[in-house]
Image: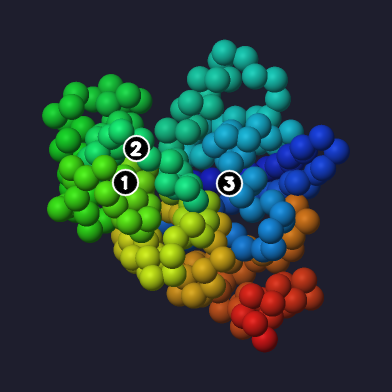
Amino acid sequence: MSIIQIKNLKKKFGDNEVLRGIDLSVNKSEVVVLMGPSGSGKSTLLRCLTFLEEPTDGVIQIGNHEVAAGEINRARKNEIRELRKTTGFVFQSFNLFNHKTAIENVMEGPIVVQGKSKEEAMKIAKPLLEKVGLGERCDHYPSQLSGGQQQRVAIARALSMNPLVMLYDEPTSALDPELVREVLQVMKDLAQEGMTMVVVTHEMGFAREVADRVIFMDGGVIVEQGTSEEIFGQPKEERTKRFLSMVSGE
């Protein structure tokens, strides 16, 4: 069953066409990894899914919520708000509130967006911080946490909204190498629990091990897609082969 349906998605920045008509569906509990060179449109695709970037054309459906690109009006703003509620978005740069503790960061969404009381939000936030291995760090501020810990708080914050889909935009690229593993482990655990995930990442080991499907993008189009075994073992397209040999240093 498809959780995400993308039809003819296009995005232009001025004369620069970054996405050139993407068609993609993602099934429930599927882990999809987007990979490709810088500027291939991966992050733009992810941001268009939640209208953080306004698509130039196309239709996006997540769960029961469908929004078409076009003129923004009040009714459509409500549709976009509902669409965003279906997703948890984890950014490269954590985007935590520095003046709030770890648990306050996780409680923010349920209180502000869902209108829950502090007590209700606390009951949601505490187990999520324990889930990502930070039960002992609830009252720490972001400045008191490592980058890996901050990113795990960000994952807990995204989960606090009980999303249908988790979107990750290069979640480990701002981290020191020794902190990458702890974040990827949390993501692996979520994948094993059946969370639907779309991940933009350069972590090829994660893509090989966890992805149900790997999508290679270049020049704003999907060049090739398949299982991790197919893409890493027997890529069909020359562009895919070149990219993989470049990132593997062969």
**Alpha carbons under labels 3 and 2: distance apart:** 25 Å
C-alpha distance separating marks 3 and 1: 28 Å
Which comes sooner in the sequence, label 3 or label 2?
Answer: 3
Q: Nearer the viewer, mark 3 or mark 1?
A: 1
Q: Is residue 28 visible?
A: no
Mark nearer the N terminus (3 vs 1): 3
Q: Disc 2 marks which residue?
A: 98
Asked if residue 226 shows in the view, the reply is yes
Instruction: Relative to 35, say whether 197 is above or below.
Output: above
Q: Which comes before the other along the chain, label 1 or label 2?
A: 2
* Residue at the spot 69% in from the left edge and 63% down from the top edge: 37
Task: Count residues near mark 3 (Cα–Cα under 10 Å), then give few for <14, some for 14-19, many for 20+.
Answer: many
Q: Position of residue 143 (x, y in %)?
A: 31, 46
- Could you say where residue 129 lies in the image, as x and y percent from the top left? 23, 49
Q: Secondary structure at mark 3?
A: helix
Label ID, residue 99: none
Residue type for callout 2: Asn
Q: Residue at label 1?
A: 143
Q: Is residue 185 left or right of residue 69?
A: left
The amino acid sitting under disc 1 is Ser
Residue contact at pointers 3 and 2, CB within 8 angstroms: no
Q: Amino acid at mark 3?
A: Leu
x, y percentage for residue 5?
A: 59, 45
Q: Residue at x 58, y 41 (%)?
A: 47
Q: Name the residue beneath numbered marker 3.
A: 46
